[in-house]
Amino acid sequence: MSAAANTEEATASERDAVRVVLGMPLYNNVKFLAEAIKSIRAQTYSGFVVVMLDDCSTDKTEIIAGRWVKRDNRFSYVRSNKRLGMAAAWRRVYELARIRAPGAQYFAWVSDHDRWDPEWLATLLSVLDGDRALVLAYPRTVKVTPRGTRRGTVDPASFATVGISDPVARWDYTCQRLMGAGNMIYGLFRIDVLRKVGVFRGVLLPDRLLMVELALLGQIRQVDRVLWYRRYLALSTLRRQRGALFGPRRAPWWAYLPWWFVHAVAIWRNYVGESSDELRLSKRQILGMSARYARSQIQVVWRKRMLKIRTAFIGRRPRFPGRS
């Protein structure tokens, strides 16, 4: 066997041995990118690779990312030939991650502007390795300012379905609870489960829909440690999501319908076919679950509105009894 063949075989073996692959979508956050990459490189667990997908940044993102690729061969960089928008970019980076590490068991999206505790990956990996019933593990988080200083206390958002073995029971529990889906989406997933739930669908609030769909396939656990520091760069509104999720093209017509209705229709369409056989759910059950989801999310919307009104009058954020 030639030296070239030996090298190719070793590279393939090394790729298949990688257990964790991280997908980092990039878009015009160059001033935070180096800090984000440094915190990932500082992880105590080193058996991972990172795929960076640049969604046509117009700043110096490509230059900075390229420098780190040269320093650490665990990092790779791909630049999209056209602007995808957040939803398509998140799906594409997942696909590229599976190609980069076809033998990987776990996947996480990592942002280009946050930072992570050195024990972030090792802790979440240990949790998932220790319980096959789990499909997602995510940590507590603290908000930081654009300058990186801590903003307030630990985010109070708390949600888990540990111990609920029945899929329909998990579904109903998840639908009825307020959850910090924006935090949970940056947790560590079983990579094959993401494929089954459509990865990151092209709808408003896709992170919320993803978390609800995960309820059918397994349990979610929150690790009670601050392992992620989230930098909020802009207020997330439905109007802003329409621009960010779908890129330069006009948002599709369904993005202007009530999001809870679009989610309910998507759930019906996604699970009334072949996947229902795997889950052993009848069409009637799926229809009922879609209806219960819509009803519960309308209640969530009103609870949030009442929370804002109450906060405006009282001057502080109360905790809803329904939040777990």
Image (cartoon, helix red, strand yellow):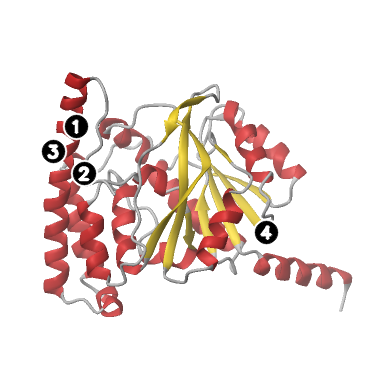
- Circle 3 — which element? helix
In which quarter of the view is residue 282 placed?
A: bottom left
Q: CA distance from mark 1 to mark 3?
A: 8 Å
Q: Earlier in the sequence, mark 3 or mark 4?
A: 4
Q: CA distance from mark 2 to mark 1?
A: 12 Å
Q: Earlier in the sequence, mark 1 or mark 4?
A: 4
> Which sits in the foreground, 7 or 305?
305
Q: CA distance from mark 3 to mark 4?
A: 44 Å
Q: Name the front one of labels 2 and 4.
A: 2
Measuring from the top left, give residue 183's x and y in whole percent: 41, 44
- Circle 4 — which element? loop
Instruction: Identify the residue position indicated by label 4 in the image.
Output: 47
Q: Earlier in the sequence, mark 2 or mark 4?
A: 4
> Which sits in the foreground, 192 or 78?
192
Kindly identify the amino acid type of the residue bearing the numbered disc 1. Leu
The quadrant of the rendering that contains the N terminus is bottom right
**Decide: marks 2, 4 in contact (CB < 8 A)?**
no
Left or right: residue 198 compared with residue 27: left
Mark 2 crowdedness (10 Å alpha carbons): few <14, some 14-19, many ≥20:
few
Mark 3 crowdedness (10 Å alpha carbons): few <14, some 14-19, many ≥20:
few
Residue 238: mark in rendering:
none
Left or right: residue 154 compared with residue 312: right
Instruction: Identify the residue position indicated by label 2 in the image.
Output: 321
Residue 307: mark in rendering:
1
Q: Earlier in the sequence, mark 2 or mark 1?
A: 1
What residue is at 76 percent from the left and 72 percent from the top? 9
Instruction: Identify the residue position indicated by label 3 in the image.
Output: 302
Q: Name the front one of labels 2 and 3.
A: 2
